[in-house]
Image (cartoon, rainbow, N blue to C red):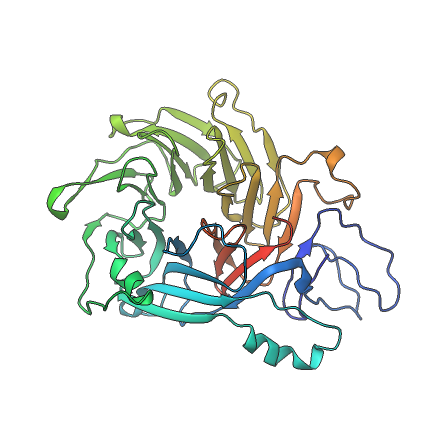
Amino acid sequence: AAAAAADEAGPADVDGAEAEEEEEGEERVFLPGHELEEDEELVCDPTAYIVQAEFTTEWPCLSFDVVRDSLPDHTVQTPMTAFIACGTQAQQANQNSIMVLKISNMVCHERGEDDDEDDESDEEENAPDLAQRDLPHRGGVNRLRIAPQPGHIAATTADTGKVSVWDLGPLVGSLEGRGGLDAKQRALFTHAFGQEGYALDWSPVVPFRLASGTCEGAVHVWDKMEAGKWSVSAPCVGHTSSVEDLQWSPNEANVLASCSADHTIKIWDARQAPARPALTVPAHACDVNVISWNRIEQHLLASGGDDGRFSVWDLRTIATSPDTIASFQWHQGPITSLEWHPTDSSVLSVAGADDQITLWDLAVEADDAGAAAPDVPPQLLFIHQGQENIKELHWHPQLSGVILSTAESGFNIFKSISV
């Protein structure tokens, strides 16, 4: 069980946690929504983490992606190293950039009973080491995604209405000590749309196939051509409001899912573009902000809405029985990000505008939960807090159980004792 430092929210390992009767000076589990007494403060229990690190950048980075590196997969020993690519939201358009960061020396800060006086020095000693390489980017970066194929090819959507494709290989190579940088490096390809967009996703099946969405409700499919050119399809029309997120099928080359502020999820067949959607699901009674396609149980799709609810859909039956197979209303603000665990098909991470990141195991049933607190769903494993206005989270595909998240207040990286 855990809480956090005085002016921070903090983690709570709620798997089997049960609030105890308060006694003077006694610690208790804090859950979001509960009130603190006048003489109580939140303090973080570092034993709830195997790894915990945080850092900030000069400008907020409200979208990022994990860079696959040459280090061994599924590393569980500390200290750990991770590479990410992120895009800034600077005050002036010409101050923005794409940054590739190497975050190393990530360890778990173990706190003893007499460590209070040394908190500040301990935080400095346990802060991760950062190395950075930049590319100029005209306009704020709304979203950044890296293609899953080798080569470190990335795409960005900008507040200028442009979608660009970039080669981040030289930046990654420089951080790994494999060469220098081209100071004049530019985008490989840029397409200007009439209005800005956010949704962006690379196909894991077709190499360098990209989907992008606009705030006008259009979906476009991109394919890499010869001689460095890219084809951009005519708009796939069906949404009546902004396309918020896109997800390619993990096993079907031409199947794409989208979600929108029009409250729907739509399934598309890319072979028919431009076309109407193959399937439309009225998914939430509000804006549908994010979706995530399960890479292992490939019939499962998760969605998160503005009302703080997230749901799980079975794509095998959604056309004839459009009911969720699971739905949870824990978060007290819009769901801003969610993602299935890369190797555990029942585990899902969810971030909300209520400054919480929650970890869930949907395989847990009520009878398996043990002595869980009565107001905590048995599937809820862990609550992480401490960031303000969380925008995105991702599981690290090479570091087992490690989550990275970005917010207006900076980045967090952690591995809990629960997953």
User: Residue 214: where, in percent of width, then height?
Assistant: 32, 44
Front residue (pair 195, 30) = 30
Q: Tell me if I can see residue 254 in this picture.
A: yes
Query: Residue visible at 51% across and 37% down?
Result: 302
User: Residue 308: where, in percent of width, then height?
Assistant: 58, 45
Front residue (pair 288, 126) = 126
In-image side of 87 versus 312 (left or right): left
User: Residue 16: where, in percent of width, then height?
Assistant: 75, 46
Front residue (pair 224, 151) = 151
User: Which quadrant: the N terminus?
Assistant: bottom right
Seen in the picture, residue 393 relative to 185 is either above or below; the reply is above
Q: Tell me if I can see residue 355 in this picture.
A: no
Query: Residue visible at 65% across and 61% down?
Result: 10
In-image side of 226 versus 356 (left or right): left
Residue 216 location, quadrant:
top left
Query: Residue visible at 14% across and 45% down?
Result: 229
Seen in the picture, residue 329 relative to 299 is either above or below; the reply is below
Query: Residue visible at 40% across and 24% down?
Result: 279
In-image side of 54 versus 30 (left or right): left
* Number of dots carrying numbers: 0
User: Residue 64: where, in percent of width, then height?
Assistant: 40, 56
Which residue sits furthest top? 320
Which residue sits furthest left? 227
